């Protein structure tokens, strides 16, 4: 990993913790705020630890984009949890005779950037 990439990843990691430290739940209840802060810290720790062995610049860049998207969406919607996507099973088929493998590929392509690591955790 290049020094600039390492610096960017560490900066992003610290940004997540700064967001968690200043987080206020939308409901205003102290217990909700603490639960959401704890979730942010645990989720960041899990995902960063899971991806610490990555060496490919492109995959590191994708993980960083996902992290930034999740931060921005969390701040915008005041909800730290990932937003759900609603794609019905086999709902992307537009042509007759598509096989299950093609459906899985289409579902993977249709998944938003902020949910790329959701199935892996």
Image (cartoon, helix red, strand yellow):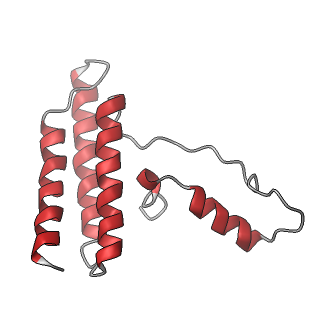
User: Relative to 53, is 2 on the left or the right?
Assistant: left
In the depicted view, which residue is nearer to us: 80 or 6?
6
The image shows residue 53 at horizontal and vertical percentages of 26, 79
Q: Is residue 99 above or below residue 68?
A: below
Question: Which residue is depicted at the point 76% across and 70% down?
Answer: 100
User: Is 94 located above or below residue 58 in the figure?
Assistant: above
* Residue lying at 85% horizontally and 61% vertically, measured from the top left: 95
Furthest residue toward top: 28
Badge count: 0
Q: Is the N terminus in the top left, top right, bottom left or bottom right quadrant?
A: bottom left
Q: Residue at x 17, y 56 (%)?
A: 13
Quadrant position of residue 66: bottom left
- The spot of residue 99 in percent (x, y) is 80, 71
**As drawn, 32 above or below 104:** above
Residue 35 drawn above or below residue 105: above
Residue 10 is situated, as x and y percent measured from the top left of the image, at 13, 62
Where residue 108 appears, as percent x and y from the top left, is 58, 63
Residue nearest the observer in this picture, 56 or 41 = 56
Q: Quadrant of the C terminus?
A: bottom left
Is residue 47 toward the left or the right of residue 24 in the image?
Answer: right
């Amino acid at each position: 990993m290049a020094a600039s990439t390492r610096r960017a990843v560490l900066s992003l990691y610290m940004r997540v913790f700064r967001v968690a430290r200043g987080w206020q739940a939308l409901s205003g209840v102290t217990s909700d705020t603490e639960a959401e802060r704890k979730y942010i810290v645990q989720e960041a720790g899990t995902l960063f630890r899971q991806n610490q062995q990555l060496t490919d610049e492109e995959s590191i860049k994708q993980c960083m984009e996902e992290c930034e998207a999740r931060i921005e969406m969390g701040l915008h919607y005041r909800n730290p949890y990932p937003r759900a996507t609603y794609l019905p099973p086999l709902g992307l088929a537009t042509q007759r005779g598509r096989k299950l493998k093609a459906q899985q590929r289409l579902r993977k392509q249709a998944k938003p950037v902020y949910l790329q690591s959701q199935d892996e955790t």
